[in-house]
Each structure stands twice: as C-alpha cells, then as structure tokens.
Amino acid sequence: MKHYPRYSLETLAKRIVLANGAFPQAPLPLALIDRWVAGAEGYSLTCCDGGVNKLRQYTERLPDAVVGDLDSAAPELKQLLKDRTHHSPDQETNDLTKTMRYLHASYGPSAITLLGASGGREDHLLANLVLLPTYAPLVDELVMLTDEGYFLLITEPSLVEVEPGQQLSVFDFYRQSLTFRGVRWPLEAYTLPELSSGSLNCATAPEVYLEAERPLLLYVANL
C-alpha cells in the first residue's frame, strides 16, 4: 500500500514539469519554482514547449530542458536553449506526453510535480486530465498542483493524508470497481455510473483510502 502525506513545500517532488497553461499564482507552486530558481539541491525543471515563455517572464534562469514540437517557444529562447531542447515533431501526442516520455527515458520512473497544466484553454486542461492516468507506467508518483488544489494519480491501493472536512473528488476514466473510504459518501467495490459521479465528496477522517485495479485521479481542494 502506498502512503501520500499532506503536500507541502517539503513533501512535493523536486522534479518539476511546467506545462503551457496558466503560470502558477498560488504561494505553494511559486515557492516550489523559487527553490529551483535558487538552485536548491535536487531540484530540476522541464518545460513543455511554450511553458518556457511564461517561465522566462518570471525568472532569468533557463529550464533544464524544453520538450515538444517547439511550435510555441519564442524564437529567441530556442537559440538560448539550443543545447537543452528536445524536439519531438510527432503530432499524435501532445507536449505533456512527450515530456513525460522524455523524463522516463532519461531518468526512469520518478516522482513528478506538474505545474501550469490548468488555466488557459479548457480543451488543453481536459486533455491533460484524461492523459494523466496513461502516465502510470512512466512515473513513480505524479501530482498535478494547481492554484486551487491538486490532482493525485492513484495507481495502487493508497492512503492519502487529508484534513477532515476537506473537499475531495475521484475521477475514474475506466468505469471500474473502486473503493473509497474515509469520506462522507464512501464507496465499496462500486462502479461509478458517470465520470462526474465521484465528484464533490468530503473527508471525514485524517486519511482516505482508495483502491482500484486501474489508475484513477483523486482531486483534493485547498482548505
């Protein structure tokens, strides 16, 4: 069984991926980027194509890598980053998928904090959420941190630390039997009839338990 602590600056994964959505505004994701900017030990930051443009508006530091078809990165940045770009012109996958595959090929499965994957165009957000479960073979842990909360990729029976009263939603893209305990409306080996059926739940305990055969997403809203 896997255990996930309450996420904080100390417990979030140091391998950061910055997508090309809205640049973070909340204190926690910005603090995570600031640690990388300051050169804190173990931190790295990889941009999905045009995410580098937004990073450059925040800091002069160049990302460790930029991955994608490079149709969004500013031309002047491409020149600066020529030794750090990983061009993948394949139009059958998006830049986030290309980035996850690049990191897996370079470092193996690792814990990743994904930023900048929400906001911006809503079709990009929906595509990102649908794709997150498909990254299960590529990552050891994946948290998509937003300004309002976070999405956690659940790939095995898991205990997740939360605060009683915290708002939670579970999203199952595979229509499978799942178990969800420690919440106001628990589920026991139950198949959600619709994708939205697992939304707007609430924690009643300091830990919630989730189990399913295939990957699913748990959303935890900020208090």
Image: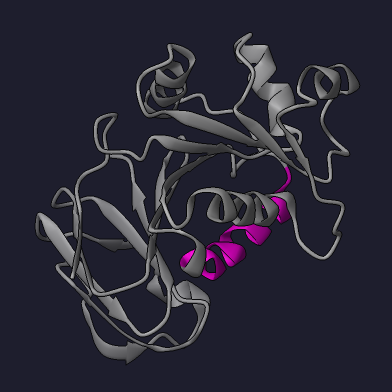
Nearer to us in this view, 166 or 110: 110
In the displayed structure, would residue 32 be above or below residue 215?
A: above
Q: Residue at x 47, y 40 (%)?
A: 146
Image x and y of residue 169, in percent:
37, 63
Residue 65 quadrant: top right
Q: Look at the image and say whether residue 179 sits in the magenta stretch.
A: no
What percent of the width, then of the height, locates residue 194? 50, 82
User: Residue at 74% of width from left, 23% of height from top?
Assistant: 53
Q: Which residues make up the magenta segment?
A: 121-136
Q: Quarter holding the N terminus?
A: bottom left
Question: Which residue: 27% across, 78% down?
Answer: 211
Circle count: 0
Give the left or right position of residue 114, taking residue 6 as reference. right
Q: In the visual, does 67 lie left or right of 220?
A: right
Q: Residue 8, how many percent across, how many down?
A: 26, 34
**Magenta stretch prevailing secondary structure:** helix
- Establish if 24 lies above or below 57: below
- Please provide percent x and percent y for residue 108: 47, 56
Q: Quadrant of the C terminus?
A: top left
- Would you place residue 114 above or below residue 30 in this image? below
Look at 36% across and 71% down and name the residue there. 155
For residue 60, side relative to residue 157 (left or right): right
Q: Inspect this view and state whether residue 125 appears.
A: no
| Residue 130 visible to an observer of this rendering | yes
- Quadrant housing residue 119: top right
Task: Give whichever of 70, 221 is nearer the camera.
Answer: 70
Q: Nearer the viewer, residue 38 or 124?
A: 38
State the colouring used for the structure image: one colour
